[in-house]
Amino acid sequence: MTRAWVEVDLGALRRNGAVMAARANALLPMIKADGYGIGAIAAARALEPLAPWGFGVATVDEGRELRNAGVERPIVVFTPLLRVELASARDLGLTPALGTAQQIAAWSACGGGAWHLAIDTGMHRAGVRWDAMHEIRSLLEDAPPTGAFTHFHSAERDDGSLQEQEGRFEDALACLPSRPPLVHAENSAALARTRRSRWSLGRPGVFLYGVGSGDGALVQPEPVVRLCARIAELRTVREGETVSYGATYRARGERRIATLPLGYADGYRRALGNRGQALVGGRLARVAGIVTMDMTMIDVTGVECAVGDVVTLIGRDGEHELSVEAVANAGELSPYELLTGLRARLPRRYVDPA
Ligand SMILES: *Cc1c(COP(=O)(O)O)cnc(C)c1O
């Protein structure tokens, strides 16, 4: 009997992948940051039946983990690599995203194979500027990239920036000595807003893990993640008594308080103190007081429950759902931060293992 855990519905993850695959010409699922916290290897295996072109990660270590688990498809490493990492990337058969003349020259010099050119069309995070392609053009004649891509900064906003970035991307591609076989741009929000991609690969991330991308989206994902904990103690507090550090919760009348054995060291964030909600036997209960490192208290007054009962902090229970977005909103967090912040101390339990 585990005190707290993350339940992952791999069937839902695969179905979300199929929704993205139906809009993309081929799939390059992003399984960086340990598959947004749900487990990169489990995510890769669950998506395998969709025959993705390859997988996207952020670091060489993430690529190594997948190679060690037997993943043979291309693995693109999207965060710029330091020079000292290039040899390991080459030995593991990883495909780096390169975006400066130095990186491209160093990758060639170390005998690296396939690589993708990162083109900065407005994110200003990594890659060669769309209007500075001349800086690398001659290098590309000797070592042409197998792919080229850009990344949208506000695809969920419908503010015209995506179209502007796509235009810049096209301009940059036209400056290349030859158009690479693989060109890609869309993240989840962009794919969820298109019926059919014009690019060769789509790079969905968060949608796969059950997080939607706002009102303009044509499709919504199924929930994938459930965060659960068991009630460890139950107590009655009296009128005027307070709960947790800083005494921020004060009982108005007699209240019933349940203690859950998880806290911000598990990734149930401190920002959810007095704001988060939990589902107990299908009924809503509020977080009472500050979330502590290892314990969180909820107000279960009038809710039938007992020590050992399972409480849902993210996910569905009965008619109610606490979506990742709703929980994140309650704490003024980004859903990405909440998901990737669920820590290794919480065991992952996979439902419908692929
Ligand atoms: C993380 C990432 C994605 C996926 O973004 P989502 O918003 O999670 O779909 C796509 N491309 C790049 C380069 C990324 O870093």
Image (cartoon, grey):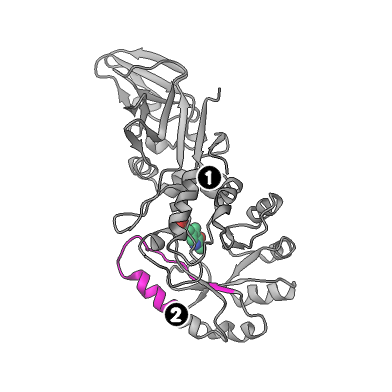
* Residue 118 visible (yes or no): no
Toward the left, the furthest residue is 252
Label 1: how many Cα within 10 Å (few below 14, some 14–19, many 20+)? many
For the N terminus, which image quadrant? top right
Residue at 59% from the left image edge and 45% from the top image edge:
42
Local SS, label 1: loop
Residue 269: image quadrant is: top left
Label of residue 37 in the image: 1
- Residue type highlighted by circle 2: Glu
Q: Is residue 218 above or below residue 127?
A: above
Q: Quadrant of residue 218?
A: bottom left
Residue 131's x, y, as percent?
A: 46, 82
What's the magenta region?
A: 147-170
Residue 117 point in image, percent of width and height: 57, 73
Residue at the disc numbered 2: 170
- Report whether 71 appears left or right of 233: right
* Disc ID at residue 242: none
Front-most of residues 14 and 7? 14
Q: Estimate the x, y position of residue 11 in percent, counting from the top left.
A: 49, 44
The correct choice, above or below, for 183 with respect to 329 in the image is below
Q: CA distance from mark 1 to mark 2?
A: 34 Å
112 vs 252, nearest the viewer: 112
Contact check, label 1 and label 2, Cβ < 8 Å: no
Considering the image in quadrants, where does the C terminus appear? top right
The amino acid type found where label 1 is placed reads Gly
Q: Residue shown at 59%/75% (left/top)?
A: 100
